[in-house]
Amino acid sequence: MSAQHEKGEIAVIILAAGQGSRMKSDLPKVLHKVGAVPMVGHALAAARSLDPAQMIVVAGHGAEAVTKAVGKLDPEAKIALQTEQLGTGHAVAQALPLLDGFNGRVIVLYGDTPFISEATLAGLASHDADVVVLGFEAADPGRYGRLVTGDDGTLQKIVEYKDADETTRAIRLCNSGVMAADAGLLRRFIGALGNDNASGEYYLTDIPGMAREAGHRASVVTCHEDETLGVNSRAELARAEAIFQTSRRSQALEDGVTLTVPETVWFALDTHIGRDAIIGPNVVFGPGVTIESGAEVLGFSHLEGCHVSTGATVGPFARLRPGAELGGDVHVGNFVEIKNSVLDEGVKVGHLTYLGDAHIGEHTNIGAGTVTCNYDGVMKHRTEIGRNSFIGSDTMLVAPVSIGDNAMTGSGSVITQDVPADALGLGRARQVVKPGLARRIMQALREQKAKKG
């Protein structure tokens, strides 16, 4: 099989049925997040790089929550249910009916192993052996299963630690559990698996030995140990997050991004940042963020589900929420929140402002304290502001409302009706001045306080 795959040659099964009791959580283990994305999302993203004909996630514990999450992460993925957790071989067996008629290569991944790389998956997919197991050289092999290989590099057998003699335990090539096999062979041997073992479970690791005994070739593809890290506890989840963040920071620097204090920047799995962008300290990226080349995000800003164009500046202390689209040279300053709004080129929103469900035209200036009042308690409403407009400080824009091109609003206004192009909108009470009244009020208050003693 070549390294380039026609769609239809590869299918992926992701095992995500385990409870993860060591996590001490009501949340299914695979839904705990690394890089702001559930761990199963990492497996889905890596698998999708192969352009597979099908992807199947085997759910069990918390199946409803896992199914819902997978539907959001990858709507094309299918769900197979493992109502009883009877081992990895049994889990794969639940997925195989969804692959009826598929005769290519099947790759089995784990939803709690978030770091398998696209390059490693390509190696598994393109290898010409009938069964391929992913192995790694462990710094501390511990109680991992060992991969015993022949002089020609073929896989002879997988030996669990408890069954290994001292010679076998000295082997540092360990089993990750990830496997690739031709679909027909997988169907044949999954059906022949037994559960005559201490756990009474059906193990996928028995398949390479069964295949070899039947005259098929089994082999090993290796990767770095970090790729095989499985997460089974909160401590391991924290370690996985640290590994992920360290890797993404290094990659960003290599890609030409300036991170002024790298160790304080937090990435999501799908964060995209162009070269010559500048990211200040303590910036947090949630899912779905794209920062174009030459943009700058200043310190203590939080961004998710947004797009920031070339030349734009964000922060410090800004929040961009899903649906925020910032055009070129837009400025969003401190304590500004943008949600589901498009800011065209050159818009300035300096400080202390909320813009939600809005469209702001080119080169408009939004004064401090402006709020789009977009929610009536039941429904959301939009605000439209034209080009080259000036919105005075502390303007409340009660949506649905529109402000025309080159229009203005007076500071402190509550705008409930549309303001046409070139017009000034005012919505505030006329100021009244009462000479000497402030002094008399303060004197009376002080007298009352003195009487109370």
Image (cartoon, rainbow, N blue to C red):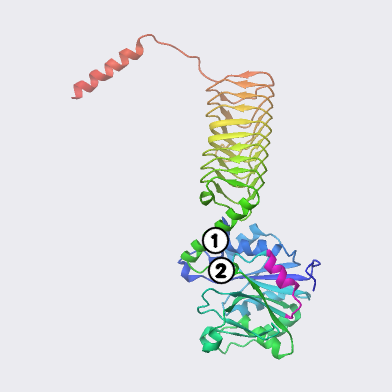
The picture places residue 349, in percent across and down from the top left corner, at 59, 31
Per the image, is 123 magenta?
yes
Which one is nearer the viewer's eye here, 17 or 219? Answer: 219
Q: Residues within 10 Å of mark 1 (few under 14, many from 20)?
A: some
Magenta stretch secondary structure, dominant: helix
Going by the numbered disc 2, the residue's amino acid type is Leu
Judge from the rendering whether residue 300 lies leftward or rightward of residue 7; answer left or right: left
Depth order, front residue of 220/75 = 220
In three-dimensional space, the C-alpha distance between marks 1 and 2, rounded to whole angstroms, equals 10 Å
Secondary structure at numbered mark 2? loop
- The part of the chain drawn in magenta is 118-130
For label 2, the residue is: 229
Q: Quadrant of the C terminus?
A: top left
Quick check: 374 above or below 162?
above
State the residue at coordinates (73%, 65%): 50
Q: Quadrant of residue 24?
A: bottom left
Q: Are marks 1 and 2 in contact (CB under 8 Å)?
A: yes
Q: Nearer the viewer, residue 2 or 214?
A: 2
Q: Is residue 419 magenta?
A: no
At label 2, counting other C-alpha atoms closer than 10 Å, the crowd grade (few under 14, some 14-19, many 20 or more) is some
Among numbered discs 1 and 2, the one appearing first in the sequence: 2
Q: Is residue 398 above or below residue 97?
A: above
Label ID, residue 243: 1
Inspect this view and state whether residue 164 appears. no
Q: Secondary structure at mark 1?
A: helix
Q: Residue 324 falls in which quadrant of the image?
A: top right
The answer to which quarter of the image holds residue 67 is bottom right
User: Which residue: 65% across, 60% down?
Assistant: 71
